[in-house]
Amino acid sequence: AQTVTQSQPEMSVQEAETVTLSCTYDTSENNYYLFWYKQPPSRQMILVIRQEAYKQQNATENRFSVNFQKAAKSFSLKISDSQLGDTAMYFCAFDGSGAGSYQLTFGKGTKLSVIP
Amino acid sequence: GAVVSQHPSRVICKSGTSVKIECRSLDFQATTMFWYRQFPKKSLMLMATSNEGSKATYEQGVEKDKFLINHASLTLSTLTVTSAHPEDSSFYICSAREDSTDTQYFGPGTRLTVL
């Protein structure tokens, strides 16, 4: 079974600064997807970024980028130029579609606070 | 972007009644949809996986006769909480897996309160 670990329950960052959220996972599969979702106080889960395991290039979406280290099974999220609207819970998630299971395995989340 | 709607956003009902929650993928097809429950300050807990045209697969500990799931089309799944009790009060979230990108997109959630 896959596991996803987010070792930082809470983090804070000054507005306009950069912050990195960590995520590690455990799997025996070779093909899979990794995601970061954010859940602001509205509780709507929003897709932040998506990474396909067979792609070596790290995914980027505007101010959000990942550092995907497949051998180390690490998938960290970097948020640049942090904004107040980035305040949210961030969940790392694993999708082992390669094994025919479409379920997401979530980490416990990191609560990020952006300080003005 | 891919949008998933969920209705109603909030519902209050009396103990013993049934409540239906709808989940729709508005601009994409989703063969597979999922239903989650989320407790305060916790991660999402998967309740069941719903596949279009077939019976849902329930996670261990989830009563299939209490939480009825129907996935009649590629854009609609429904969750019916039957004979609701106060302990069923929770935040329920659906997601739809976009077939072309293998990505789950989430609905805005439904806050259920059973009196």
Image (cartoon, rainbow, N blue to C red):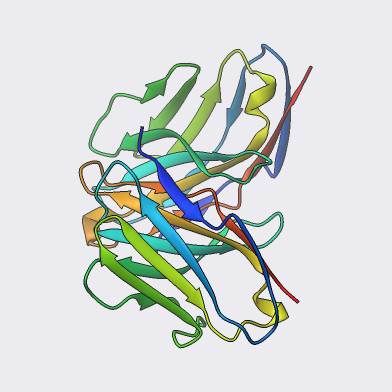
Side of B115 relative to B38 (left or right): right
- In the rendered image, the residue lying farthest to the right is A116
Q: Vertically, is B34 above or below A41? A: below
Q: Which residue is painted at 38% across and 53% down in the image?
A: B24
Residue B29 rendering spot, x and y as whole percentages: 24, 49
Q: Vertically, is B111 above or below A32? A: below
Q: Which residue is painted at 65% across and 18% down in the image?
A: A83
Quarter-wise, where is residue B23 in the image?
Answer: bottom left
Side of A75 relative to A32 (left or right): right
Residue B64 rendering spot, x and y as whole percentages: 44, 84
Residue B84 rendering spot, x and y as whole percentages: 62, 82
Total numbered badges shown on the rendered structure: 0
Residue A77 rendering spot, x and y as whole percentages: 51, 30
Task: Say whether residue A102 is visible.
Answer: no
Q: Quadrant of the N terminus of chain B?
A: top left
Q: Which residue is painted at 20% across and 43% down in the image?
A: B100
Task: Say whether residue A55 is visible.
Answer: yes
Q: Vertically, is A76 above or below B72? A: above
Quarter-wise, where is residue B52 in the image?
Answer: bottom left
Q: Quadrant of the C terminus of chain B?
A: bottom right
